[in-house]
């Protein structure tokens, strides 16, 4: 521990000691097609035989851009970056440039990249939550970066309204994971995202959905399609290219005028490189086939996994909750009553029990993320799900 890997294919990984695992980490999410998917391999081999970067325009930019535009409601325009962290920075810059305002409203437990400007109140303690001010996520962060943020509780429209009232005409944008994947796969309350949309419109702020996880995973059109709420800007990553480094920032035409008119700067040597975009074209082609059926099927298998783990917990008398929409679910060993609705609910989790379970699951050949998250790909099979549930039951029985 930690494991080192040397290979894998489909839904399986093999470590350096030749142990095989059903993989639900998917490299923290990007491997939506599993490992070594033939369509992705073919695309990468073909791209490898051409120039790997131009530092200039090429056909794949508009081909992939138009594909995204056809799938994602907010995508009047698209810009490519290499990582989700970079994509968020562009989204925030565009929002500030468009509105002329300095502040960004974010929420407790939401992760928007590792950079100083947004790594605040991601995993705050209960005491830090109650303090009512942004808490740093790392040593070495510049303290004054917090001056540009307002942090509120999620899933409470009243908390967002209070933030706007306190900082009248100063908030440029609200940024949120539309489904709180980074802190336990917690869903938005009914009507919450629509209420955020209406609040931003009323206050003259932009709404940003961080879809680095939900994009091309929850639905082929992203969470914004699933929930029926269109943000002004969306950031996408992980699943967009099936593994190679790529992120996309999509948004309304009037917002992207800030770039077109030179009112906001944006650059990056590796942005939109041919290798990554060739992978994205192949990945989006697989995911969107038959109206997005491969992705829809993967989500259904993920729901079977979620519901199966819940049933195992009930059978064995293990207090737990399993949240998620299918292709992203999360296991919580907790005695909290009622559904989990916000980050603060995760503070009641039994972290020691989770660590023990994850080790037992590895012994049973199931690879799960360290925070109890499972990602399901389009190549996980019904047999994988059944084998996983049997392994989970054996592991939980040992608790």
Image (tube, rainbow, N blue to C red):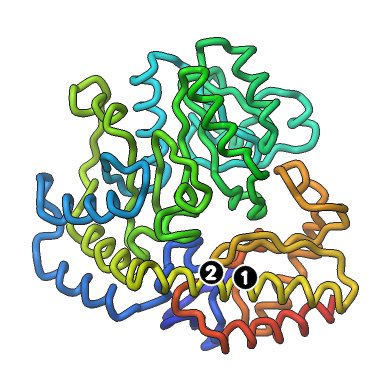
Q: Quadrant of residue 2?
A: bottom right
Disc 2 designates what residue?
299
| Residue 47 circle label | none
Write the residue at 84% across / 52% down.
338
Write the residue at 77% across / 69% down.
356
Tell me if mark 2 has few (under 14), some (14-19) or many (20+) residues whose alpha carbon lies within 10 angstroms of its own: many
Tell me if mark 1 has few (under 14), some (14-19) or many (20+) residues whose alpha carbon lies within 10 angstroms of its own: many
Task: Say if 334 sits above or below 9 in the image.
Answer: above
* Place of residue 225 in the rendered image (x, y in percent of width and height, measured from the top left): 45, 51
Task: Say if 241 sits above or below 18 in the image.
Answer: above
How many numbered marks have been drawn onto this rendered protein structure? 2
| Quadrant where the image shows the N terminus | bottom right
Write the residue at 40% across / 41% down.
234
* Place of residue 9 in the rendered image (x, y in percent of width and height, measured from the top left): 41, 83
Task: Say if 324 sits above or below 161 in the image.
Answer: below
* Place of residue 132 in the rendered image (x, y in percent of width and height, measured from the top left): 72, 23
Disc 1 designates what residue?
303
Asked if the residues shown at circle 1 and circle 2 are in contact, with their CB atoms under 8 angstroms apart, the answer is yes
């Amino acid at each position: 521990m930690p494991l080192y890997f040397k290979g894998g294919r489909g839904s399986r990984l093999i470590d350096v000691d030749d142990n095989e695992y059903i993989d639900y980490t998917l490299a923290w999410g990007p491997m939506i097609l599993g490992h070594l998917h033939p369509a992705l391999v073919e695309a990468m081999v073909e791209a490898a035989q051409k120039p790997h970067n131009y530092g200039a325009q090429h056909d794949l930019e508009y081909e992939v851009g138009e594909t995204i535009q056809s799938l994602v409601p907010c995508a009047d325009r698209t810009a490519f970056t290499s990582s989700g962290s970079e994509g968020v920075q562009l989204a925030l810059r565009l929002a500030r440039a468009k509105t002329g305002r300095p502040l960004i409203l974010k929420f407790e437990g939401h992760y928007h990249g590792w950079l100083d400007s947004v790594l605040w109140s991601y995993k705050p303690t209960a005491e830090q939550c109650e303090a009512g001010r942004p808490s740093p996520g790392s040593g070495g962060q510049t303290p004054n970066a917090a001056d540009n943020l307002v942090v509120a509780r999620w899933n409470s429209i009243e908390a967002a309204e209070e933030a706007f009232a306190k900082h009248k005409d100063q908030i440029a944008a609200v940024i949120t994971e539309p489904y709180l994947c980074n802190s336990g796969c917690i869903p938005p309350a009914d009507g919450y995202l629509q209420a955020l949309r209406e609040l931003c419109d009323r206050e003259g702020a932009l709404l940003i959905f961080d879809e680095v996880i939900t994009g091309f995973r929850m639905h082929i059109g992203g969470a914004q399609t699933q929930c029926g709420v269109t943000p002004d800007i969306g950031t996408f990553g992980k699943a967009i290219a099936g593994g190679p480094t790529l992120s996309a920032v999509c948004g309304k035409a009037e917002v992207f005028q800030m770039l077109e008119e030179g009112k906001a700067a944006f650059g990056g040597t590796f942005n939109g490189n041919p290798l990554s975009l060739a992978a994205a074209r192949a990945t989006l082609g697989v995911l969107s086939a038959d109206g997005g059926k491969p992705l829809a099927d993967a989500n259904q298998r993920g729901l079977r996994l979620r519901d199966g783990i819940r049933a195992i917990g009930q059978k064995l008398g293990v207090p737990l909750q399993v949240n998620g929409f299918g292709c992203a679910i999360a296991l919580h060993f907790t005695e909290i009553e009622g559904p989990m609705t916000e980050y603060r609910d995760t503070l009641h989790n039994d972290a020691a029990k989770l660590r023990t379970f994850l080790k037992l699951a590895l012994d049973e050949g199931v690879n799960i993320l360290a925070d109890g998250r499972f990602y399901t790909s389009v190549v996980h099979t019904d047999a994988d799900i059944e084998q996983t549930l049997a392994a989970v039951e054996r592991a939980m029985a040992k608790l």
